[in-house]
Image (cartoon, rainbow, N blue to C red):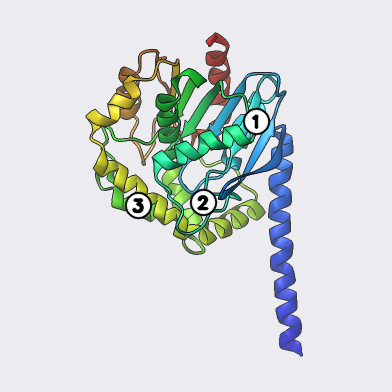
Amino acid sequence: MILMLLTISVASCIQAAELNFQKVLEQERAWAGLSSKKVKNNEIEWTYSEGGDPRKPTLLLLHGLSGTRDNWNRVARYLTPNYHVIIPDLPAHGETLVADQFDLSIPNLTEKLRRFIDVAKLDPNLHIAGHSMGGAIAMLYSAQYPLEVKSLLLVDSAGVFKSSNTVYLKDTAKLAELVVRKTGDFDRVMKVVMQSPPFIPQELKTGQEKLMIVQSKQTNKMVEQLQKMATLYTPESFALAARGIDSPVFIIWGKQDQIINVEVAEELRRLFKKAEKPLILDHVGHMPILEAEQLMALPYLKFLSTVQ
């Protein structure tokens, strides 16, 4: 009887912690001017955040590997007053769940993203931004749908580059070390991906770690797809997609990025026809969207104001 009561008590505590985690996220989204939405498209039920006036220009923000839509909340707070902001959980991330056999390749995610825009009835003529893996998707999307992309923002973007010199790009198998598989991994990974970690409430940290552990199998499949991208493309062939993008491009990078080194920012700039000088943020790692949201959001707003 005592064991049963203890089991019920532990289960109740876990449930309460999970509810508190969701409540904290909801509060953060509301603070950023965002609300949660869902839409079904064939085999994918997308979960996404939406904020701002739908009559204003649409910004589509894409998170990185093992991230979620909530990675963008701190930046979105500066964007929702003047823009219509859409932030999806990409397939196999956050609350956008997919079957185990789902194709997680970058080209397929890009095509599914276009279908999401259709089913969510969004204005296809949008500004797109991507962080890390989301940057690779944003670039491919811009190359495939050039008439529908008004501008492109790349934040510490993934890809295949000549100037890559970090251990994670020289040997992409090491990206598997960034997958959160067990308790304690979250703090370890954060020390690698961030130079200046922001304060994260304990409920949010614990809840995020649990979510990432649950999704670690799918995250590992995404790592395999990034490894495949590195073998299928050379820097020269990857550059062909970038050179075909006509939209104005703004590049932001953390100077102390240990995942994708800062020299890549200038290499990327040279590939685009209409690229601003990269904004390099000192004392910032791979996650400017969390480490230095104001330092990147305000220049991004200035950039957007110049785009017709």
Residue 104, image x, y percentages: 43, 48
Residue 165 visible at all: yes
Task: Identify which amino acid the numbered label 1 is placed on.
Answer: Lys
Q: Which residue is mark 2?
A: 92
Q: Amino acid at mark 2?
A: Ala
Which amino acid is tagged 3?
Glu
Cα separation between marks 1 and 2: 22 Å
| The one of 96 and 130 positioned closer to us in this rendering | 96
**Left or right for 142, reference 90:** left
Between discs 1 and 3, the one toward the N terminus:
1
Checking the image for residue 121, the label placed there is: 1
Q: In the rendered image, which quarter is residue 77 located in?
A: top right
Q: Is residue 170 left or right of residue 218?
A: left
Q: Which quadrant of the figure has residue 75?
A: top right
Answer above or below: position of 104 versus 196.
Answer: below
- Work out whether 128 lies above or below 1: above
The residue that label 3 is drawn on is 224
